[in-house]
Image (tube, rainbow, N blue to C red):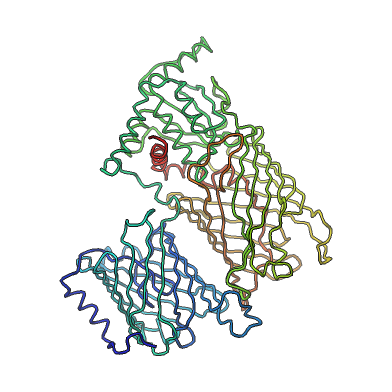
């Protein structure tokens, strides 16, 4: 049906003319908003814009070109700006939500697909036009919405107008995007956008209402779009949708915060007051400030005419760089003449032969501990660092090191040792646990949801007890008793009881042995060993594990096989581009042999991963191939509860993944290929800050050190 059947097909021309002649146009940029398809754009057609890097966009639309009509289907879409110039997304199109498509004929379609759009760099600089190429419904066995396109656009800010045009090749209904297309987006006000397009077959128009930039918190934006007109006669559904976009967690934390603006006037005053304490504070003031903020295993001493402070952060669990930034800020705000004078007296008292020279430079080394192991060292000069906090100009006397952390710790003369001891201080880590099947023929979203309560208790250096209890909360019918995936449903029981022992070895090698009860029914052990290059851009590792089932047979009388893995892995990191490439190969848990390639994209503290797995099941001669996309986010406050003998907090990393089979005419679910031990408290997560505890990462994110202290002052100082 046509919403406005009397509207002429020259709507596109009329819209452009209205934009050019309207006396009420307010000059502004034209917002980048989603289309009803798998890309940013108008209604059915794309423009050459991409989602801002670090933003995530969540959309729901009704009305999808399918089977020669605008069909009454639901369209769920999530996308993100992965890199500058690149947006990627995933879409689910469905008619029903819990219908078994194998047994019920009226269930309609349920389709999971991926999309990508790439804006060509440098083209605008030479031509004044943006050009992008893209595709939707990439891969998979059935490509119901396959579309490929190239598009160019030009924005006229003085007219609040963007014009676009391009060429597409598609299998969409009614010839949509199969040929030349063009469009216009006009934004007469900061909260409304009108679009008109020729979609290669017919003319369409819609209106978009949205919140102006800066209205909602966290840089988020909410928008609504609705079809005004379509020339497609076979239309079961008016096209409409809602969209919510927001920067991913922590993405802007490395952007220099300007304290000189009127908005930050009071905050700048608080920070200057804190930093001014350096002129009068004593060593006792410094120690008490660090203890009061909850840093544990606190040590203070000296080496080579510098003050050395070692401590452990268990409070800032989004990213260890925040804990380091807060600790450095507190040290800079206290460590002045008084502190270094007190330190010199203590040194002389403890060692009458010590030759301590008083000079203008007041050098400090901060050593970051994890479970008592020295993992990372930061060297700076306190006056230089105070100026960095005040001005955002990085301190030249600021350096980072991992390879020297342990020898420097061992060679330091400690005057105060292990204050606020971390021994026995338990962390109760609460998080959701989710087993799911998304967009299968059995349902839109089948799930088993539980609360995971993890008791993690550090003991001596590098050692900890790790217990986790699962409490089922809810599940869909296919996870019920007798359901298709009942065997994967969470049970009310202890599913993990391990003891870990880690050692920091010379040359940036760390190894951890873990043994006990795991996966709700297996006993065994794991060893992980990792080597990191001095700057952290290369990591080479190895995992070996063996687990034996406590039961010989399952409830169907089938013999339960042991699980074991022998895997090698390599990671190349480019933190200046927020990117890591991971390679893994060997024998996986189910006895399958294969390899996995993973591209990790860090957007703040959110990790988006795309991985390709090829693996050959035990006893099979054929390799099976899969592509998976996952998002990993911390689910805990930025500043957790102060560590005490019991600290309740959230999890550092909650992962949601989607996987599809590739290279086959079918899309049968993965039956466990490519699995590994994947401990919650493995080396990468527990000791290496999710793979980011490196000099290269800290150098690329220096402003985040400053911002962490500013944020700390903002939330703690009255």
Q: Position of residue 131 (x, y in %)?
A: 33, 70
Q: Along the line of sight, which residue is nearer the eye, 318 or 505?
A: 318
**614 sits to left or right of 90:** right
Q: Quadrant of residue 117?
A: bottom left
Q: Position of residue 208 (x, y in %)?
A: 33, 71
Q: Along the line of sight, which residue is nearer the eye, 350 or 717?
A: 717
Q: Looking at the image, which residue sits at the far top?
A: 352
**In the picture shown, does residue 138 fall above or below 199?**
above
Q: Position of residue 546 (x, y in %)?
A: 75, 51
Q: Which residue: 46% across, 13% down?
A: 345
Q: Position of residue 98 (x, y in %)?
A: 60, 74
Location of the N terminus by quadrant is bottom left
**505 sits to left or right of 34:** right
Q: Which residue: 45% across, 21% down?
A: 283
Location of the C terminus by quadrant is top left
**254 sits to left or right of 593:** left
**662 sits to left or right of 154:** right
């Amino acid at each position: 049906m046509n919403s406005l059947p009397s509207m002429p097909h020259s709507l596109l021309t009329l819209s452009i003319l209205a934009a050019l002649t309207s006396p009420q146009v307010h000059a502004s940029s034209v917002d980048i908003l989603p289309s009803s398809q798998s890309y940013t754009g108008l209604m059915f057609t794309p423009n050459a814009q991409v989602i801002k890097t670090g933003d995530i966009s969540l959309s729901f639309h009704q009305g999808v070109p399918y089977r020669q009509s605008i069909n009454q289907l639901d369209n769920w879409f999530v996308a993100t700006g992965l890199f500058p110039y690149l947006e990627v997304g995933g879409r689910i199109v469905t008619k029903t939500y819990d219908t078994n498509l194998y047994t019920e004929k009226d269930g309609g379609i349920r389709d999971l697909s991926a999309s990508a759009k790439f804006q060509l760099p440098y083209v605008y600089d030479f031509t004044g036009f943006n050009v992008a190429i893209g595709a939707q419904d990439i891969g998979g066995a059935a490509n119901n919405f396959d579309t490929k396109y190239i598009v160019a656009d030009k924005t006229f800010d003085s007219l609040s107008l963007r014009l676009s045009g391009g060429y597409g090749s598609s299998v969409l209904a009614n010839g949509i995007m199969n040929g030349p297309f063009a469009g216009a987006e006009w934004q007469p006000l900061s909260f409304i956008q009108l679009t008109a397009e020729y979609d290669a077959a017919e003319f369409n128009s819609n209106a978009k209402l949205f919140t102006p930039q800066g209205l909602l918190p966290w840089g988020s934006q909410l928008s609504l779009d609705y079809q005004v007109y379509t020339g497609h006669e076979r239309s079961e559904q008016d096209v409409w949708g809602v969209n919510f976009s927001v920067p991913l967690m922590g993405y802007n934390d490395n952007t220099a915060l300007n304290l000189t603006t009127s908005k930050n006037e009071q905050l700048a005053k608080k920070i200057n007051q804190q930093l001014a304490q350096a002129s009068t504070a004593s060593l006792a003031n410094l120690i008490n400030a660090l203890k009061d903020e909850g840093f544990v295993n606190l040590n203070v001493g000296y080496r080579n005419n510098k003050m050395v402070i070692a401590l452990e952060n268990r409070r800032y669990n989004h990213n260890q760089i925040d804990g380091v930034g807060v600790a450095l800020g507190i040290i800079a705000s206290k460590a002045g003449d008084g502190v270094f004078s007190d330190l010199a007296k203590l040194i002389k008292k403890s060692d009458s032969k010590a030759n301590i020279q008083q000079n203008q430079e007041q050098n400090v080394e901060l050593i970051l501990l994890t479970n008592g192991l020295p993992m990372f060292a930061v060297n700076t000069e306190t006056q230089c660092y105070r100026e960095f906090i005040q001005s955002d100009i990085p301190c030249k006397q600021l350096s980072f090191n991992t390879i020297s952390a342990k020898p420097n710790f061992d060679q330091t003369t400690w005057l105060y040792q292990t204050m606020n001891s971390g021994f026995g201080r338990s962390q109760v880590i609460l998080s959701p646990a989710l087993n799911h099947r998304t967009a299968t023929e059995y349902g839109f979203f089948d799930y088993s949801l539980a609360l995971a309560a993890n008791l993690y208790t550090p003991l001596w250096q590098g050692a900890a007890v790790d217990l986790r209890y699962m409490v089922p909360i809810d599940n869909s019918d296919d996870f019920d008793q007798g359901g298709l995936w009942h065997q994967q449903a969470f049970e009310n029981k202890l599913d993990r009881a391990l003891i870990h022992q880690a050692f920091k070895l010379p040359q940036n090698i760390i190894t951890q042995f873990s043994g006990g009860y795991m996966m709700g029914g297996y006993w065994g052990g794991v060893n992980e060993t990792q080597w990191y290059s001095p700057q952290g851009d290369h990591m080479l590792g190895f995992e070996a594990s063996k687990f034996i089932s406590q039961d010989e047979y399952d409830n169907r009388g089938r013999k339960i096989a042991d699980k074991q893995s022998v895997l090698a892995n390599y990671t190349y990191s480019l933190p200046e581009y927020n990117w890591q490439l991971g390679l893994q190969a060997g024998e996986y848990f189910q006895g399958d042999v294969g390899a996995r390639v993973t591209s990790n994209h860090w957007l703040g503290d959110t990790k988006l991963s795309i991985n390709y797995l090829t693996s050959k099941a035990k006893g099979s001669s054929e390799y099976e191939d899969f592509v998976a996309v996952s998002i990993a986010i911390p689910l805990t406050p930025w500043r957790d509860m102060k560590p005490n003998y019991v600290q309740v907090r959230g999890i550092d990393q909650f992962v949601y993944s989607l996987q599809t089979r590739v290279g086959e005419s079918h899309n049968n679910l993965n039956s466990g290929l490519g699995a590994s031990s994947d401990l919650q408290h493995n080396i990468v997560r527990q000791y290496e800050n999710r793979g980011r505890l490196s000099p290269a990462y800290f150098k690329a994110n220096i402003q985040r050190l400053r911002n962490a202290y500013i944020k700390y002052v903002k939330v703690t100082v009255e």
